[in-house]
Image: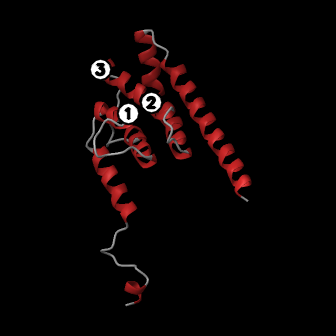
Amino acid sequence: MFGKILGKNKDNVSQSDKKHLEIVEKISKMNLTDMRAYINNKILNFEIDEDGLIEILKKLTTKNGEKRYIEIDDMDSKKKKGFDLVISVASHTKITVVAVELIQEFITFYDDVIKKFDKDNKQIYESKLKDALQKAINNISEMAELKRKMDVLGD
């Protein structure tokens, strides 16, 4: 009875929870190309948000049993798409602190894959990813500073 009064009904899932669950389900079915289209906001009726960025990074940094999403023996095109996807997430305007932490985790999680890819293909993804991480950290700092200034002006 008190649950109904306070709006705590088990069947009553909030709109934001429904949206989050929808994003998690949609991203769990995506491949790298679909995730890239999502980040570039090219998927109709599905706008990108902070949760989406975080879910993509979680998918990339979570082991499925003993297998990572990107393995050292995968095709170079898959590795490149994965690295470019993380760089895109890092430069996205809706980046959050949690996403930055997941990017950092991605870089350490795939350190061996990145180094081997760079060596074999004469690429510089190791430095590109670190630069993207630094850029994301700077963007977060700028957003925090701007919010602080807005709060001061609002008072």
- Residue plotted at (38% across, 28% down): 82
Q: Are marks 3 and 1 in contact (CB under 8 Å)?
A: no
Q: Which residue is mark 2?
A: 88
In this view, the residue farthest toward the top is: 122
Q: Earlier in the sequence, mark 1 or mark 2?
A: 1
Q: Which residue is mark 3?
A: 75
Residue closest to the eye, 88 or 153: 153
- Give the quarter of the image for residue 4: bottom left
Quadrant of the image containing the N terminus: bottom left
Q: Are marks 1 and 2 in contact (CB under 8 Å)?
A: yes
Q: Position of residue 5 (x, y in %)?
A: 41, 86
- Residue plotted at (31% across, 46% down): 46
Element type at marker 3? loop
Residue closest to the eye, 28 or 153: 153
> Of the residues tagged 3 and 2, which is closer to the observer?
2
Is 120 above or below relative to 2?
Answer: above
Q: Which mark is residue 40?
A: 1
Q: Amino acid at mark 2?
A: Ser
Alpha carbon of mark 3 to alpha carbon of mark 1: how far?
Answer: 23 Å
Alpha carbon of mark 3 to alpha carbon of mark 2: how far?
Answer: 20 Å
In this view, the residue farthest toward the bottom is: 1
Category of crowding for the residue at label 3, using alpha-carbon neighbours closer than 10 angstroms: few (below 14), some (14–19), many (at least 20): few
Q: Amino acid at mark 1?
A: Asn
Q: Earlier in the sequence, mark 3 or mark 2?
A: 3
> Of the residues tagged 1 and 2, which is closer to the observer?
1
Is 99 above or below relative to 1?
Answer: above
Left or right: 111, with 55 as reference point: right
